[in-house]
């Protein structure tokens, strides 16, 4: 079965390459918009949206879910086209697929020109691969935490796409915290997505409800006392065009000893992500069981 899934994945990647960076993602969006609402994941998404935005009506909830399926379909089909989608140049180009304002551009240049250990968090918003690509494309010494699919052939096919675009790739697992810490010791910019449920993590408030969160970023910040920033992509006009934003260093709460307070820092980071979701609710991955 794994071999079959691997072969199917490679065939789909080849087909998407033939379709190109415009038609392929548009087709993926259409398929997900059409089939997604019939899935169990859609029921999860609708419940999550309704519970997170109880003041909005059912029609608005359905519209957000439809946009989320559209975004998911585009994101999956953009995997094979990231190199073509990434067309950011030194000089601003309003027609480019990747848009970065002067403030974010200067923040990336600051990290490039003054290398130091930095933690960067992202979320499953718009195309969530782009923040990791941005670090490598801006010439930063980057290390990225990623989760591998259960199927080894599928994981290899996806890893082959990511390799070379995102710096050092560190798979999630028992050794991940040690490898991430070593990357910080080397002065790397370490990136991770932190908006999914983590059963052994502290309970925080997320979009108005209690949820368990991953404290890994806060633990690393406590140990290394390094900068922490957020990075997000915003999908523009329902297309494969994006605006990237990188925050200034975020002051994290500290305990009586002056060290980063892990639980409070985890809450602070998730508060920022919740704000991003409220700005663009249809671009988040609502199909995940974030609350249990």
Image (tube, helix red, strand yellow):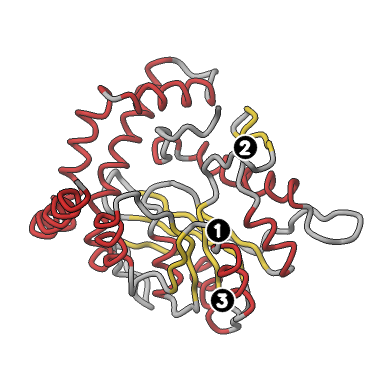
Callout 1 secondary element: loop
Q: Nearer the viewer, residue 174 or 149?
A: 174
Q: Which residue is mark 1?
A: 174
Q: CA separation, marks 1 and 2?
A: 19 Å
Do labels 2 and 3 touch, CB within 8 Å?
no
Residue 193 to residue 50: above or below: below
Q: Position of residue 102 (x, y in %)?
A: 49, 68
Q: CA distance from mark 3 to mark 1?
A: 20 Å
How many C-alpha atoms fall within 10 Å of the one at disc 1: few (<14), some, or many (≥20)? few
- Residue 229: quarter of image: bottom right
Image x and y of residue 287, in percent: 40, 33
Q: What residue is shown at x 55% (from left), y 68% (from top)?
A: 190
Residue at image x 29%, y 43%?
238
Frontmost of labels 3 and 1 is 1
Toward the bottom, the furthest residue is 113
Whether residue 272 sits left or right of residue 92 in the image: it is right
- In the image, residue 204 above or below residue 185: above
- Please count the marks in the image: 3
The Cα–Cα distance between marks 2 and 3, rounded to whole angstroms, is: 28 Å
- The residue under label 3 is 188
């Amino acid at each position: 079965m794994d071999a079959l899934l691997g072969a199917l994945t490679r065939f789909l990647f080849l087909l998407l390459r033939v379709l190109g960076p415009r038609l392929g993602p548009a087709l993926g969006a259409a398929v997900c918009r059409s089939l997604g609402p019939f899935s169990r994941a859609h029921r999860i998404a609708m419940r999550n949206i309704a519970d997170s935005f109880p003041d909005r009506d059912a029609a608005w909830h359905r519209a957000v879910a439809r946009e989320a399926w559209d975004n998911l379909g585009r994101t999956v089909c953009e995997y094979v086209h990231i190199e073509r989608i990434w067309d950011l140049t030194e000089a601003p180009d309003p027609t480019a697929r990747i848009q970065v304002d002067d403030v974010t551009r200067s923040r990336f240049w600051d990290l490039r020109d003054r290398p130091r250990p930095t933690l960067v968090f992202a979320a499953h918003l718009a195309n969530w691969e782009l923040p990791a690509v941005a670090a490598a494309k801006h010439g930063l010494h980057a290390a990225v935490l990623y989760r591998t699919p259960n199927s080894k052939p599928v994981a290899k096919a996806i890893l082959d796409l990511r390799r070379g675009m995102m710096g050092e790739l560190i798979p999630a697992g028992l050794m991940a915290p040690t490898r991430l810490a070593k990357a910080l010791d080397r002065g790397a910019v370490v990136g991770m997505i932190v908006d999914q449920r983590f059963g052994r993590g502290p309970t925080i408030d997320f979009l108005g409800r209690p949820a368990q969160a991953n404290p890994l970023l806060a633990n690393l910040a406590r140990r290394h006392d390094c900068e922490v920033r957020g990075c997000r992509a915003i999908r523009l006009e329902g297309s494969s065009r994006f605006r990237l934003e990188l925050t200034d260093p975020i002051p994290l709460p500290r305990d009586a000893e002056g060290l980063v307070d892990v639980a409070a820092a985890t809450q602070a980071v998730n508060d920022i992500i919740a704000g991003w979701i409220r700005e663009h609710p249809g671009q988040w991955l609502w199909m995940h069981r974030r609350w249990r």
